[in-house]
Every structure is written in C-alpha cells, then in structure tokens.
Image (cartoon, helix red, strand yellow):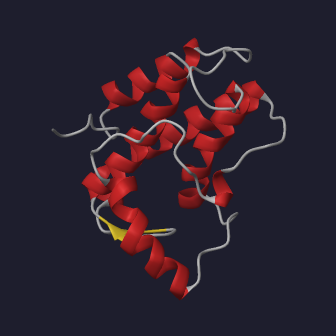
Amino acid sequence: MALPNIFNKSVTDEMIARINKLKADTKPEWGKMSAPQMLAHCNVTYEMVYENKHPKPNFFMKFILKTFVKNIVVGEKPYKRNSQTAPAFLITDSRDFDLERKRLIGYLNQTQQLGEKSFDNKESHSFGKLSKVEWNNMFYKHLDHHLTQFGV
C-alpha cells in the first residue's frame, strides 16, 4: 500500500492542518518529547535537506546506515512506538513552539513546491540517492508518526 504523496498540495495541506491542531502543551500518547521538541525533531529531516547544519556521516557510517537503517526509514512499514532515533534527531532542550511550527510548515511548503521531480534520484544526507517514492515515504511516514503520537 503506497503512502499518501507529500508532494501533492492536498496532502501537504492536510499535514499542515494537523500541525496547526497542536498546542504547545499538547501531551504525547507515548514517548518523552514535548510538542515543541517534537516539531524541532521533525525539522531535522528537512534541515538535512535544506541546510548545511548537520555533519554528514563518514563512509563507514554511511555504509552502516544504508545497509541497516535505510529500509526502515524509506519503506512503507510504519515506525514502532518508542523506536530508537539517530543522535542528530535527539532534542532534549526546550524549544519555541511557534518558531518550530513555522519552520516545519515552511519546509513542508518548500518541499511540495519543489515537487517530486526535484527529489527523484537526489542524494540524501545519510542514505545515498533516493527515489521520489523513498523521499516521500521518509517525509510522510516520519511526520505522520509524530503527529499521531500527539493525537492530531
């Protein structure tokens, strides 16, 4: 079963509507992150695409990620609750809810406007070149997982 296509405006708009249902004090149904931390955590995926903020893994680490993690991240199978996350995605400090929400919505709109053709066979930060379907799965599945975590 294919995941909804985040590159379609209607899907992006649906995700943004879900984000806008969050409040700074919305409690998770599982896990330890606050709503602002979750938004910051979701922003990391897009920071790795649009900003030169996170160091790229070395050859050995990239091999490990491509071999053991890639299919979990880009496949259609949903994430398990309380799954382990990469160090770059760990958000332990307090964050500004409105700022993180605005950033995430901006990244979603930018991604949708660039479109799937811009991502087809594009090099990812950690997994090498990904197809447009793999990019979609990574973007959609991760965000859906965390919005579900917070009941929206």
Depicted 66 relative to depicted 112: above or below:
below
Q: Residue at x 51, y 68 (%)?
A: 125
Residue 133 in the image, given as x and y percentages of width and height? 25, 53
Looking at this view, name the residue that lies furthest to the right. 94
Q: Is residue 128 visible?
A: no
At a point 29% along the width and 44% down the height, the residue shown is 77
Q: Is residue 21 above or below residue 76?
A: above
Quarter of the image for residue 68 reads bottom left
Dividing the picture into quadrants, the one containing residue 94 is top right
Residue 81 coordinates in the image, percent (x, y): 48, 36
* Residue 126 picture location, percent across and down: 49, 69
Total marks in image: 0
Residue at 43% across, 40% down: 80
Residue 31 coordinates in the image, percent (x, y): 62, 31
Q: Residue furthest left?
A: 1
For the residue pair 33 and 140, the one nearer the viewer reads as 33
As drawn, the residue found furthest toward the bottom would be 59
Identify the image quadrant of the N terminus.
Answer: top left
Whether residue 50 is visible here, answered yes or no, is yes
Q: Note whether 134 is above or below 54 in the view shown.
A: above
For this view, does 146 lie left or right of residue 72?
Answer: right
User: Horizontally, is 41 left or right of 111 in the view?
Assistant: right
Kindly indicate the quadrant of the structure image that contains residue 11: top left
Residue at the (68%, 40%) spot, across then down: 40
